[in-house]
Image (cartoon, rainbow, N blue to C red):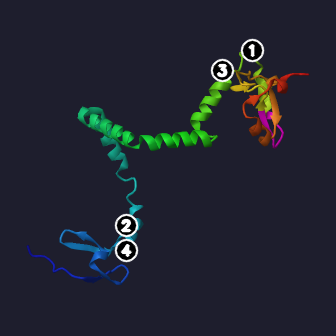
Amino acid sequence: MKGPKPFSFKVCPGCGIRKARSEYYAKLSTVSHKCKPCALDDMRKRSSRYIGKYVARQNAWKLNRYRTDAAYRERIATQKKATYDRRKQAINEARRERWANDPNNPARLYFRRKDVKLCTPPWVDKKALLAVYANCPTGREVDHIIPIKGLIDGRRVCGLHVPWNLQYLTPVQNRKKKNVITERDISPF
């Protein structure tokens, strides 16, 4: 097979620098037109013209194939399961870490809303509840005196989500209280 003679060095037309053969991408028996950094830079400049051009058509094709081809569907399911099995420990560690440290975690917020809803009696005045939250002073937080899920002297307790069970605390006080109180904290005397 006749082709271009191998060379050791070549001048890149992009940067004008003479570079070794290893600085170019291999293409069959020869190398790319431009050196690696120039080729990457050129690709980045031109890629904006092509981004998304074929994505819709590709997605439609994949979706149609997934719906109609049982073998393809089975293969994708197997790949997803293998990927999950391989990364299961890391995924679960990330979930646990996010649950513990992210107060805005959607899963945590879902369970919090669910708990509050379950602890709100149907006879409570919703406008009064909203007024308590609306009148919260700046720099304070609304806190349940008897926690929705908490402990009183080591015993489990479930306080109601009603206006007379709400109080205003500073964030520091609220974090310090957590969901643990004593009989002394709630007794009137």
Write the residue at 37% across / 74% down. Answer: 38
Instruction: State the CA–CA distance, disc 1 to disc 2.
Output: 65 Å
First-in-chain label (1 vs 2): 2
* Residues tagged 1 and 2 counted as in contact (Cβ below 8 A): no
Q: Which mark is residue 123?
A: 1
Q: Of discs 1 and 2, which sits in the foreground?
A: 1
Q: Quadrant of the rendered structure where residue 157 is? A: top right
* Mark 2 lies on residue: 43
Q: Amino acid at mark 2?
A: Met
Q: Which mark is residue 164?
A: none
Direction from residue 74 to residue 15 in the image, left or right: right
First-in-chain label (2 vs 3): 2
Direction from residue 85 to residue 180 in the image, left or right: right
First-in-chain label (4 vs 1): 4
First-in-chain label (2 vs 4): 4
Q: Of discs 3 and 4, which sits in the foreground?
A: 3
Q: Amino acid at mark 4?
A: Cys
Q: Which mark is residue 38?
A: 4
- Seen from this angle, which residue lies furthest front? 154
Residue 23 rendering spot, x and y as whole percentages: 31, 76
Residue count near mark 2 (Cα–Cα under 10 Å), binned few <14, some 14–19, many ≥20: few
First-in-chain label (1 vs 3): 3
Q: Which mark is residue 118?
A: 3
- For mark 3, give the secondary structure: helix
Decide: is 114 above or below 52. Answer: above
Q: Is residue 175 visible in this depiction of the protein?
A: yes
Query: What stretch of residues is rendered in magenta?
Result: 134-142
Residue 85 rendering spot, x and y as whole percentages: 37, 39
Q: Does the magenta segment cover residue 66? A: no
* Residues tagged 4 and 1 counted as in contact (Cβ below 8 A): no
